[in-house]
Amino acid sequence: MAVSTRLPILGGPDGEGSVQVHLNPEDKITGALCIAVYGKGGIGKSTTSSNLSAAFSHLGQRVLQIGCDPKHDSTFTLTKSMVPTVIDQLETVDFHSEELRTEDFVFIGYNGVMCVEAGGPPAGTGCGGYVVGQTVKLLKEHHLLEDTDVVIFDVLGDVVCGGFAAPLQHAHRAMIVTANDFDSIFAMNRIIAAVLAKSKNYQVRVGGVIANRSADTDQIDRYNNVVGLTTTAKFPDLDAIRRSRLKKCTMFEMDSSDPAVKAVQDEYLACAQRLLDGVPPLLIQPLKDREIFDLLGYD
């Protein structure tokens, strides 16, 4: 696995006025390639993350996927079930993490992918960043990261608070899932601004865009050209992808004799290989809201 594009971990606060949950240096993930998947709510981040995890596993990598959403539905196509969350399990032992066994919160999914659902605090209370931090801490206590090659964080919605930007403290690259529409690209613009803010003190950099549910990418391409992004993978609005979610399985378990399904499988494998080879960090500059409004659309 190429790691030449990784940058050193920086130290220091997240910036003046920040109220974000900070990373304890002892809790940082070392050794594994860490990827954080972001995008507008409902854009297909969990589908993308799970199939990317499956693709990495087919390339011989030891993969851990961490769902960072209170809905805890990130990994169900890998495990075929809605698994208990880390927070749920910690509550059962009054938050004495030493009483938990590995099998209480890590579930083996398709092709050996390790699956963890962080969960979230009760609605209106707590911080998602705390939940992510506790999850990583627990994984380290049980030595689960020592034999892992790739860690994928599947993160809730678009970044609007420091809590759900917490996975960026661990990630090497942030991949952004978007469709070829205004709302998705608007959310992507906010996400890259969050990544830029984190990159001042952490190793994370934007790695690229994954175009999803899009036959055309003209609006994505227009935005990318202005801000300095590149598209790493493209997936159409294919009914087989929708059906795979209903069947509770990955695309690699769908009928590969269907040329459209085989094309999606190959694209995921190619995307995973690009990430393993080391996508270069992109020099990007997000736009102002008005600039996006003026840029996108038809004359």
Image (tube, rainbow, N blue to C red):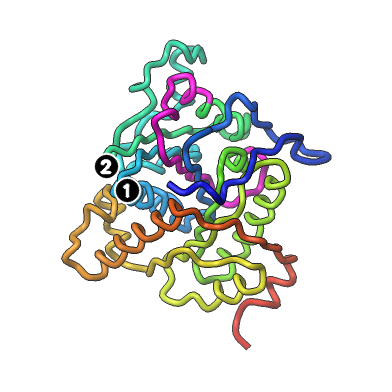
Residue at label 1?
54
Viewport quadrant of the C terminus: bottom right
Whether residues under marks 1 and 2 lie with C-beta atoms below 8 angstroms apart, the answer is yes
Query: Is disc 2 placed on a helix, strand or loop?
Result: helix
The kind of residue on which mark 1 rests is Ala
Residue 64 percent coordinates (x, y):
40, 37
Give the percent coordinates (x, y) of residue 252.
Answer: 25, 54
Residue 10 numbered tag: none
Q: Is residue 298 magenta?
A: no
Q: Nearer the viewer, residue 285 or 289?
A: 285
* Residue 142 appears anywhere in the view: yes
Seen at 83% across and 40% down, the residue is 16
Q: Which mark is residue 110?
A: 2
Q: Amino acid at mark 2?
A: Tyr
Magenta residues?
137-163
- Of 132 and 269, the residue lying toward us: 269
Residue 4: x and y in percent read: 54, 49
Q: Residue at x 46, y 12 (%)?
A: 98
Dot placed on the residue nearer the N-terminal end, 1 or 2: 1
| Helix, strand or loop at mark 1 | helix
**Which of 169 and 129 lies nearest the eye of the viewer?**
169
Determine the CA span between mark 1 and mark 2: 7 Å
- Residue at the spot 27% in from the left edge and 58% down from the top edge: 243
Q: Eyeballing the image, is 292 above or below 193? A: below
Q: Farthest residue toward the left?
A: 257
